[in-house]
Image (spheres, grey):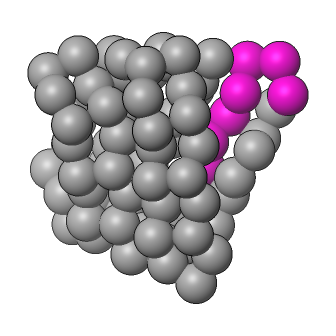
Amino acid sequence: MKVRIIHYEKGTVFEGDVEAVYFPSEAGDTGVLPGHAEYYALLSSGAVKVYGKESLELEINRGTVAVKSDSVVMLIR
């Protein structure tokens, strides 16, 4: 699944193929695997965790996320 994380000042901070991504949403902590149902949410402060060939843990303040079956795009602060 393709993941792209875009910071509102720094631009793209991560882009790559991953196995899973976890993020803090206003509804609670959320995990996404390939094939996930379409999902849109507001992000709350906490850690975004990306797992795959390249792994990443990134602290965010808030943002938005759009999940499709084969991709995730996050706009973060």
Quadrant for residue 64, please give it: top left
Residue 6, given in percent of the width and then of the height, sits at 68, 34
Q: Is residue 13 above or below residue 3?
A: above
Quadrant for residue 25, please give it: top left
Does residue 9 appear to the left or right of 60 in the view shown? Answer: right
Give the residue at x 45% y 53%. Answer: 49
Does residue 6 appear to the left or right of 33 in the view shown? Answer: right
Residue 55, given in percent of the width and then of the height, sits at 57, 70
Q: How many marks?
A: 0
Give the residue at x 43% y 19%. Answer: 45
Front-most of residues 8 and 56: 56
| Any part of residue 66 in sight | no
Residue 51, given in percent of the width and then of the height, sits at 45, 70
Does residue 33 appear to the left or right of 76 in the view shown? Answer: left
Quadrant for residue 24, please give it: top left
Highlighted range, magenta: 4-10
Front-most of residues 77 and 46: 46
Pick the quarter of the image with the N terminus. Answer: bottom left
Give the residue at x 45% y 38%. Answer: 47
Q: Is residue 50 above or below residue 65?
A: below
Does residue 73 appear to the left or right of 37 in the view shown? Answer: right
Residue 68, given in percent of the width and then of the height, sits at 32, 49
Pick the quarter of the image with the C terminus. Answer: top right
Q: Is residue 8 above or below residue 54?
A: above
Residue reaching furthest to the right = 10
| Any part of residue 73 in sight | yes
Magenta run includes residue 5 = yes
